[in-house]
Each structure stands twice: as structure tokens, then as C-alpha cells.
Image: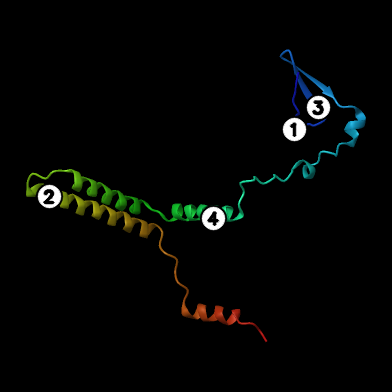
Amino acid sequence: SNRLRCLKCPSVSPQLSLGLLRTSKMSSAASSKMPSATPSTTTKRRKKSIFYNQNMAEKMKEASDCRKEFLETVTISDMWLVGTIIVFSVLGNTYRFNNHSEVYFGAFLFCCSFGVYLLFKERERRLSPPPEKPSKKFAAAKAFEAEPAE
């Protein structure tokens, strides 16, 4: 018979026998030696893996912070500009131009795409204006407060 230990309730140990689940309770003397199950005793600190490295953990935290900052700062206009550059670079290297008018038409489309980028950028600038810089009086007053009093 296979014995399984239940981690949530150590006083009960289920046994598997012939496909039926039977439980056998521990004696009252053994259960009285068990510590009381309070929230402070049930939460145990996890043992660190043998592969744990403090330096690697710090670098992973820095990378996570950088990813969050990137996702907060990237905008639609940035994605549009990168996409425009990639599309026109690939098309310029793969498409065979037959006459000069196709080259001019491609340049016209690139200029239109750049115009769309400028419209996106202007829209983003209007929706979220940059924070105002503090005035010189405010900066001087703040510097005065920061000086230690003697």
C-alpha cells in the first residue's frame, strides 16, 4: 500500500488500498504533541534552491524594473516609427523597381507614413503634457529648507 502524507493536515495520513481512500487518525497522544495550527506557524519560509545566486537575483530584479519602465514609456508613435522604418527597409531591399515613378511613389508613401508619425506624436504630447518645471523661487526656497539648522 502506498502511503501519502497530507501537507495541510498532518494529523491525518490517507492510505491508498485497492482504489479506496481510507484515513487513519493519529493517536491522541501524538496529536497533542503537534503544535497548534495558527497562521504564524503554518507559513514556513521556503528553502532556497541550490541554484540560487544573490547576484543573479539582483540582476533579474533590475531587468524586471527595466522592462516595466520600457512598457510605461513606449508609445504608439514609437511603434509606428519603428514599423515604418522596418517595412520600408525590407521593401526597399526586396522590391525590384521597374521605373523611376515607382521610386518616387515609395518616397511619397514614406513621407506620408512619417507624417502619420508626427500626428501621433502631437496627439500624445497634447494628451499628456510634460510636468512643469519648478520656478526659481520655489527651487531656492526648497534649497533653503534643506540646509541644516545650526
Left or right of 92 in this view: 128: right
Q: Residue under circle 1?
A: 7
Q: Are marks 1 and 2 in contact (CB under 8 Å)?
A: no
Q: Nearer the viewer, residue 126 or 85?
A: 85
The mark found on residue 59 in the picture is: 4
User: What residue is disc 3 on?
Assistant: 12
Q: Residues within 10 Å of mark 2 (few under 14, many from 20)?
A: some
Residue 64 lies left or right of residue 124; in this view the side is right
Q: Residue furthest bottom?
A: 150
Q: Earlier in the sequence, mark 2 or mark 4?
A: 4
Please state which of the two labelled residues, at mark 4 or mark 3, is closer to the viewer.
4
Please name the residue shown 34% across and 54% down the image: 78
**Residues at marks 3 and 2 touching, judged by CB atoms closer than 8 Å:** no
Residue 71 spot, x, y in % from top left: 45, 52
Residue 74 lies in quadrant: bottom left
| Placement of 131 over or under 28, stated as above or below | below
Q: Which residue position holds label 2?
A: 103
Callout 1: SS: loop
In this rendering, the count of numbered labels is 4
Earlier residue among tags 3 and 2: 3
Of labels 1 and 4, earlier in sequence is 1
| Left-right relation of 136 to 29 | left
Q: What residue is at 64 percent from the left and 46 percent from the top?
A: 50
Quarter containing the C terminus: bottom right
Between the residue at mark 3 and the residue at mark 2, the CA separation in whole angstroms equals 80 Å
Q: Nearer the viewer, mark 1 or mark 4?
A: 4
Marks 1 and 2, how far apart at CA:
71 Å
Amino acid carrying label 3: it is Val
Mark 2 or mark 4: which is in front?
Answer: 4
